[in-house]
């Protein structure tokens, strides 16, 4: 199964749309499985990162019999030091974004902790690519 | 204990999401940092916060929280109300501050 969603930078009112759709889809497919919660947490944080830090993005979801693969690719400023960005507490969120309660610097850690495979790459000035994979059947 | 029980015992006011009043309450979580709640809250907890915007409901719903309590007389934004009703996750309000309401909730369900 294949799904695509667009994300608009700066528009917090639409953040979370893709993850809530994915939750509905996965609940029908696999029921009340731990993987549903983990995967939607990861996707929500990825969506919010595009809204908070980039200009626009696309979510691509591939659901297979044994795994869910999610790509979140954005056009934006990119991340110059990924290791630093991954550190809990590190955030470049604006004052306005922080007032809303974002900007704890925990989003990327949440994504990593809630996925089985995690790949983050970025080109400064162009954008950021995130791929996460969740195994439906644990080996 | 259900959401309806804590409303009575703590004298909270229900603003929206009434269809979720029978949700089971397993505990509480206190934070105004959204990704902290995303990462650390657990299903069935009541989330105490002063954030009133729509993303609060996105998180409450994705994490299957029992309800959200807004402190110090804060009220939910209009689109927060709409999403609360859609998802059936109640938003409750109180004049109490975070310290007081968290203490009372803890006493009630510890
Ligand atoms: N898609 C992105 N484009 C550009 N920069 C990003 C992107 N995602 C993350 N970053 C950078 O990495 C930092 C850390 O991201 P992370 O999600 O962990 O925290 P945050 O978004 O700042 O706050 P939180 O997620 O806790 O609300 C961000 O502050 C930002 O500098
Ligand atoms: Mg983030």
Image (tube, helix red, strand yellow):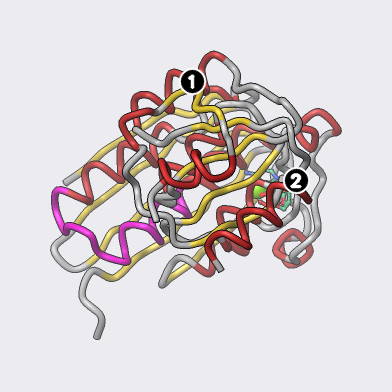
Relative to A127, say whether B30 is above or below. Answer: below
Mark 1–mark 2 distance (CA, rounded to whole Å): 21 Å
A64 relative to A73, above or below: below
Q: At which x and y percent is residue A74?
A: 55, 38
Q: Nearer the viewer, residue B56 or B25?
A: B25
Q: Nearer the viewer, residue A58 or B103?
A: B103
Q: State which region is magenta.
A: A28-43
Whether residue A107 is visible, yes or no, is no
Residue at 54 percent across and 24 percent down: it is: A8
Main secondary structure along the magenta-highlighted residues: helix
Disc nearer the start of the sequence (1/2): 1
Q: Which residue is mark 1?
A: B81
Q: Position of residue A32 (x, y in %)?
A: 23, 59
Instruction: Name the quarter where the N terminus of chain B is drawn.
Output: bottom left
Q: Where does residue B31 sit, x and y in percent of width and height?
A: 70, 51
Which residue is label 2 attached to? B98
Question: Quick one: quadrant of the C terminus of chain B?
Answer: bottom right
């Amino acid at each position: 199964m294949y799904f695509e969603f667009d994300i608009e930078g700066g528009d917090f009112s639409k953040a979370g749309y893709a993850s809530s759709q994915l939750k509905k889809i996965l609940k029908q497919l696999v029921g009340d499985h731990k993987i549903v919660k983990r995967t939607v947490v990861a996707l929500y944080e990825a969506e919010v990162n595009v809204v908070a830090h980039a200009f626009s993005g696309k979510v691509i979801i591939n659901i297979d019999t044994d795994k869910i693969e999610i790509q979140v690719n954005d056009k934006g400023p990119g991340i110059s030091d990924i290791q630093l960005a991954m550190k809990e507490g590190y955030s470049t969120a604006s004052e306005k974004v922080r007032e809303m309660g974002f900007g704890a610097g925990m989003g990327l850690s949440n994504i990593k902790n809630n996925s089985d495979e995690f790949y983050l790459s970025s080109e400064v000035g162009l954008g950021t690519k995130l791929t996460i994979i969740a195994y439906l059947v644990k080996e | 204990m259900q959401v309806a029980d804590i409303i009575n015992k703590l004298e909270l006011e229900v603003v929206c999401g009434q269809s979720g009043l029978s949700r089971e309450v397993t505990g509480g979580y206190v934070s105004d940092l959204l990704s902290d709640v995303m990462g650390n809250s657990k299903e069935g907890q009541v989330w105490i916060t002063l954030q009133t915007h729509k993303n609060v409901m996105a998180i409450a719903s994705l994490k299957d929280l029992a309800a959200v309590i807004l402190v110090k007389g804060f009220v939910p934004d209009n689109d927060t109300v709409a999403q609360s009703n859609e998802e059936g996750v109640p938003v409750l309000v109180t004049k109490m501050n975070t310290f007081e309401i968290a203490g009372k909730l803890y006493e009630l369900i510890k």
